[in-house]
């Protein structure tokens, strides 16, 4: 009898090897998929969540401050010794108190683009990084900037910095620390949405409250802008120009993966909350009373004429009162 494998043994061996190979292939593909998911979470999802959380806090507190802040005076270096300076100051009379110089805050909300991408976005907010155990509101200027990514070719990164100095010229100071929010960005753009500025209407004569209730609300037209810069001269033009702060913001981001093979796009919407003092509605003025008719005037005169008892002095000439006997009200009854 010749030694060797039968057909059945070959089929069984082939089947077992196929099952082992299929199991190895499935396990390898599962590991590869899980690796991609973890890479996506680390490179895309985590930065997006961090950016969205921080940007929502900043933009929800954006506002126009209604105050001025003092100008910073440049300190001059004193070459003389402090003792000589004190002696000279004691000899000289005290100078009059200087008036504080106040400077207007420029670019309360400002945005600029470069090649269809965001270049920078800066605004003043009352809700920057968290500060606890502080009873005063923490107001700061925030700057978001899109710069080239050094570690990834043809990509950008988004940086953030904040300063308690509200001056726009000081926010780009190198001494202010900044940190990266998102890296490996392919494109980043922002669209600003705001209501159309209403034109002043001519004052119509006062309407009755019933007519006011029946008036239908006017439809508000929403406009969009790709960049934002408010100008003071726009105040003079009715219904033109941009308001100081937009009402809605639409952010579009496209991010590469670690190997720049796949890209993921996001579209995030934010609303800037605005508060206004409640104004009481003006109450309609009461209509003037009509003049009394001649007949009613004569009746009133006849009622005020003294009677015979009043002429005799037995009853006081007080209209609306009469003398009574034994009354608990002191004898006077209405």
Image (tube, rainbow, N blue to C red):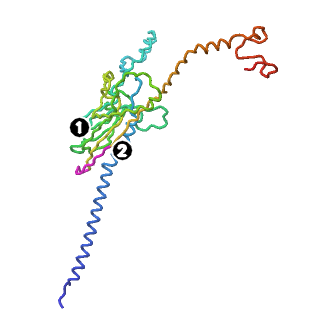
Q: Which mark is residue 50?
A: 2
**SS state under label 2:** helix
Which residue occupies the foreground of this view, 302 or 123? Answer: 302
Looking at the image, residue 217 sits to the left or right of residue 6; the answer is right
- Residue 325 position, x and y percent, is 81, 19
- Residue 193 position, x and y percent, is 32, 35
Quick check: 76 above or below 183? above
Q: Residue at x 24, y 76 (%)?
A: 15
- Residue 22 position, x and y percent, is 26, 69
Residue stretch rendered in magenta on the structure: 258-267
Quick check: 116 above or below 78? below
Q: Which mark is residue 213?
A: none
| Picture quadrant of residue 290 | top right
Q: Residue at x 49, y 33 (%)?
A: 135
Where does label 1 land, which residue?
Answer: 116
Looking at the image, residue 302 sits to the left or right of residue 254; the answer is right
**SS state under label 1:** loop
Q: Is 140 contained in the magenta span?
A: no
| Picture quadrant of residue 274 | top left
């Amino acid at each position: 009898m010749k030694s060797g494998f039968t057909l059945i043994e070959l089929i069984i061996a082939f089947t077992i090897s196929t099952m082992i190979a299929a199991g190895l292939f499935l396990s390898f593909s599962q590991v590869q998929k899980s690796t991609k998911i973890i890479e996506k979470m680390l490179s895309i999802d985590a930065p997006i969540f961090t950016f969205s959380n921080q940007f929502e806090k900043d933009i929800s507190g954006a506002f126009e401050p209604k105050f001025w802040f003092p100008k910073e005076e440049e300190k001059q270096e004193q070459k003389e010794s402090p003792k000589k300076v004190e002696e000279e100051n004691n000899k000289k009379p005290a100078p009059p108190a200087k008036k504080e110089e106040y400077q207007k805050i420029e670019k309360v909300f400002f945005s600029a683009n470069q090649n269809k991408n965001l270049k920078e976005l800066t605004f003043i907010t009352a809700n920057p990084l968290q500060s606890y155990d502080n009873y005063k509101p923490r107001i700061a200027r925030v700057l978001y900037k899109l710069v080239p990514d050094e570690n990834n070719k043809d990509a950008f990164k988004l940086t953030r910095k904040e300063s308690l100095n509200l001056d726009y010229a000081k926010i780009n100071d190198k001494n202010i620390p900044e940190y990266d929010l998102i890296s490996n960005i392919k494109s980043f753009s922002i669209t600003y949405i705001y209501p159309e500025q209403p034109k002043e209407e001519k004052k119509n004569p006062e309407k009755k409250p019933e007519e006011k209730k029946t008036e239908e609300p006017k439809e508000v037209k929403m406009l969009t802008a790709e960049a934002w810069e408010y100008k003071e001269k726009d105040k003079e033009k009715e219904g033109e120009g941009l308001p100081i702060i937009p009402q809605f913001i639409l952010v579009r981001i496209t991010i590469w993966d670690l190997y720049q093979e796949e890209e993921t796009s996001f579209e995030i919407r934010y609303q800037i909350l605005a508060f206004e003092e409640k104004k009481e509605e003006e109450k309609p003025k009461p209509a003037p009373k009509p003049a009394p008719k001649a007949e009613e005037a004569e009746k009133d005169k006849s009622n005020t004429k003294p009677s015979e008892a009043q002429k005799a002095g037995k009853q006081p000439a007080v209209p609306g009162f009469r003398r009574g006997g034994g009354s608990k009200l002191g004898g006077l009854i209405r």
